[in-house]
Amino acid sequence: MNIGIISDVHLGDDHCKLIRGGNITATYESLKNNIFKFTKKKALDYLVLDGDIIDFSINSFEESCIAAKYFFRAIEKDGLVKELIYIPGNHDKHVWDAVEWETNIIRRLKEHEDPRGFRRTQPGLIDYKSNAPLELSGVSRVVNTKHYGTLFLEGLFEKGKTLPINVVYPNLYIRTEKDVYLITHGHMLELAWVLLSEVFCGEPELAGKQGIRELEEFNIPLTSMICTGVGQGGAVSKLFYTIQKEAKRGKTGRMKKLLDNVMPKLDQLIELPGYVEFLDDALLIAIRKAALYLAGDVSDSRYDEDFFKKESVRKRFLIFHAASCSQAEELGFEAPNKIIFGHTHEPLSYEAPMEIENLSFVKDGKAYLYNTGGWLDEEGKSAEIFFFDDNGSLSSVNIK
């Protein structure tokens, strides 16, 4: 069983290295050649797409899907893989949301059955010890086949030429003879994606164990808006994207113009009694200062070499890892001691992982972090493709 893992392709982003204007690139050819070099010109059994594959945060759904189809059709045409495992990240989490709607609402209603509650998470399991194919816990395979049912994503391929796409969220577990690997995108280590669960953690209604389901579910009101909703506002989305790009270059000119236009309108909308109107003015001044401060000092996990060294990130890692260990145990796996992330676009190769110590859940108290890097040409960064061979041994190759 041969497995490849990549992430952060960002199909739909103009800076994507693999597809440009509907055409495959030399970087895609390098990816293909490295896969065939590893497999000796055979198809991978699984290619894991570890999040931020389609980028819905900067484009409308239709634009992003049109950009994505060229990549999916290329890997099918070139015979790179037998099945895909798609783990949505923060930029394409709507893929998971759409799976929830399709399987629990739309299909049920079409069959005149009552809808089911959303699962919120869907773990995937691959066990080298038993040489078993991918298992989606709680999901039934199609009768008389080894595959799970088809999903809307197969529409990205040409008609009649599809690959099975298995959607897992947010964790895939791979057990080898020596280790248990956790494959996850990693966005839940960043404040924006767990803000509500951290802010409301002391409320009695939310008391109790915070598992993977709770980390996802508690934060849906905010993450649904900032994840994909921000890319669906037409001209408003284009404006936000312009401000974001400027902010990352340390510029705030467009933000200042926006605030100069918006603040007087907010002042008219906020109606307070005359004797407390100073609160109105103070609030608007505070909003302006906060917006300009954030725009001028953007803290972004992308290209942050020290992301995993930050105390706040370490704390979130401990919470997320503990929840993942509990999930793995419930599924019959040992606690994962090796973790492959994406999200930051900063590669950590097989030869140079980051070591995390003093973990009570794993053997020897240590875990090792690997990172897939990313496929954007900004900042001159590279991507790391990871491979598991037939024996479950891990390796990686860096692609510029």
Image (cartoon, rainbow, N blue to C red):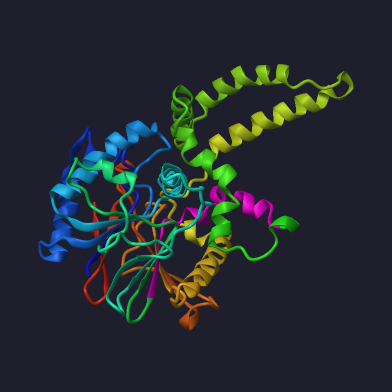
Q: Residue at x 19, y 44 (%)?
A: 73
Residue sitting nearer the eye, 398 or 137: 137
On screen, residue 17 above or below 44: above
Where is residue 199 shown, x and y percent of the image? 67, 51
Q: Is residue 188 magenta?
A: yes
On screen, residue 249 above or below 366: above
Find the magenta span and give its range: 180-201
Where is residue 170 shown, x and y percent of the image? 45, 57
* Residue lying farthest to the left in this orientation: 41
Query: Is residue 18 something one can see in this rendering?
Result: no
Left of 384 or right of it: where is 335? right
* Residue lying farthest to the right in this orientation: 275
Q: Residue at x 64, y 35 (%)?
A: 290
Residue sitting nearer the eye, 337 or 296: 337
Query: Is residue 44 something one can see in this rendering?
Result: yes
Q: Quadrant of the N terminus?
A: bottom left
Where is residue 359 shown, x and y percent of the image? 53, 75
Left of 25 or right of it: where is 206? right
